[in-house]
C-alpha cells in the first residue's frame, strides 16, 4: 500500500511539473533569460563523455550507481 502511494505521488509530481514547465519557461524568457529550445545533445554528450572516468566515480558503489543512471537516461 505504501509503495503504491509512493508511485502514485511520484507520477502526480512528474505530471504536475511537466504541466507547469511552459509557464515557468515563459516567466524566465520574460525576465530576459535566453533559453536554448533545441540543444545540440550529441555535442554535449561528446564533451562530457570522459567525466565518467573521473576518480570521483571509481569507487565500486558509486560507479555502479553511475552506470544505472546512464542506462536510465538512454
Image (cartoon, rainbow, N blue to C red):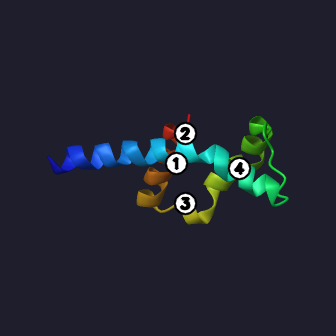
Q: Compared to 44, does 53 lie above or below? A: below
Mark 1 is surrounded, within 10 Å at the Cα level, by few (under 14), some (14 to 19) or many (20 or more) other residues, namely few
Residue that mark 1 sits on: 17
Real-space CA distance between mark 3 and mark 4, rounded to the nearest whole angstrom: 33 Å
Real-space CA distance between mark 2 and mark 4, rounded to the nearest whole angstrom: 23 Å
Relative to residue 24, is residue 1 drawn left or right?
left
Real-space CA distance between mark 4 and mark 1, rounded to the nearest whole angstrom: 12 Å
Residue that mark 3 sits on: 57
Foreground label between 3 and 4: 4
In the rendered structure, are the residues bearing label 2 and label 4 in contact, judged by CB atoms less than 8 Å apart?
A: no
Q: Nearer the viewer, residue 39 or 17?
A: 17
Real-space CA distance between mark 2 and mark 1, rounded to the nearest whole angstrom: 18 Å
Residue that mark 4 sits on: 25
Mark 3 is surrounded, within 10 Å at the Cα level, by few (under 14), some (14 to 19) or many (20 or more) other residues, namely some
> Element under label 1?
helix
> Element under label 4?
helix
Label 3 vs 4, first from the N-terminus? 4
Residue that mark 2 sits on: 73
Label 1 vs 3, first from the N-terminus? 1
Image position, residue 21 (x, y; %): 61, 46
Label 3 vs 2, first from the N-terminus? 3
Foreground label between 2 and 1: 1
> Element under label 2?
loop
Amino acid at each position: 500500500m505504501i509503495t503504491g502511494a509512493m508511485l502514485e505521488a511520484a507520477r502526480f509530481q512528474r505530471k504536475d511539473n511537466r504541466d507547469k514547465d511552459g509557464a515557468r519557461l515563459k516567466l524566465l524568457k520574460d525576465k530576459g533569460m535566453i533559453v536554448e529550445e533545441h540543444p545540440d545533445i550529441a555535442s554535449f554528450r561528446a564533451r562530457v563523455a570522459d567525466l565518467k572516468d573521473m576518480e570521483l566515480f571509481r569507487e565500486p558503489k558509486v560507479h555502479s550507481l553511475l552506470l544505472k543512471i546512464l542506462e536510465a537516461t538512454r
